[in-house]
Image: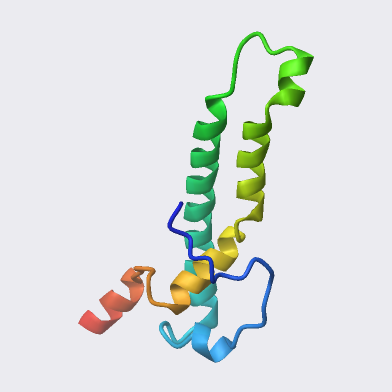
Amino acid sequence: MNNIKPTIPTTTITRDVRKMDAKTDNIYESVVIISKRANQISSAIKEELSGKLSEFASSTDNLEEVFENREQIEISRHYERLPKPTLIATEEFLEGKVYFRNPLKETEKEL
């Protein structure tokens, strides 16, 4: 997840609903697509963070080691500063970077 653009806002911003439903012609379908992509991003970030933090895990942690591990704290802070997965997914959707298809619409076109 290191390819997250720095231009993605880290706070919630107002979005134009007409832009969000332009690709699907249905705002609810767009929201479902964004939410599924946000879940994928969230899982990837969680897996990446767990992998990095597992390097610091030891079976004999004592209290001093827990408080002195600055590198682990910096990694955690980095992930806390990242934009939320929903914001990343929304930006990707609006930029056309999310692949999606609706099998129901495809069968309707065939009939």
Query: In the drawing, does residue 101 fall left or right of residue 41?
Result: left
Residue 9 location (% of width, % of height): 61, 70
Where on the picture, by quarter, is residue 71? Answer: top right
Q: Position of residue 45 (x, y in %)?
A: 52, 47
Q: How many marks?
A: 0
Q: From what the image shows, is residue 48 above or below residue 25?
A: above
From this viewpoint, is residue 26 visible? yes
Q: Residue at x 65, y 55 (%)?
A: 81
Q: Is residue 13 above or below residue 41?
A: below
Residue in front for this viewpoint, 66 or 87: 66
Residue at 63% across, 33% down: 72
Q: Residue at x 46, y 78 (%)?
A: 94
Q: Quadrant of residue 49?
A: top right
Q: Is residue 111 visible?
A: no
- Furthest residue in direction top, as rendered: 60
Q: Position of residue 6 (x, y in %)?
A: 53, 66
Q: Residue 56 appears in which quarter of the rendering?
A: top right
The scheme the figure's colours follow is rainbow
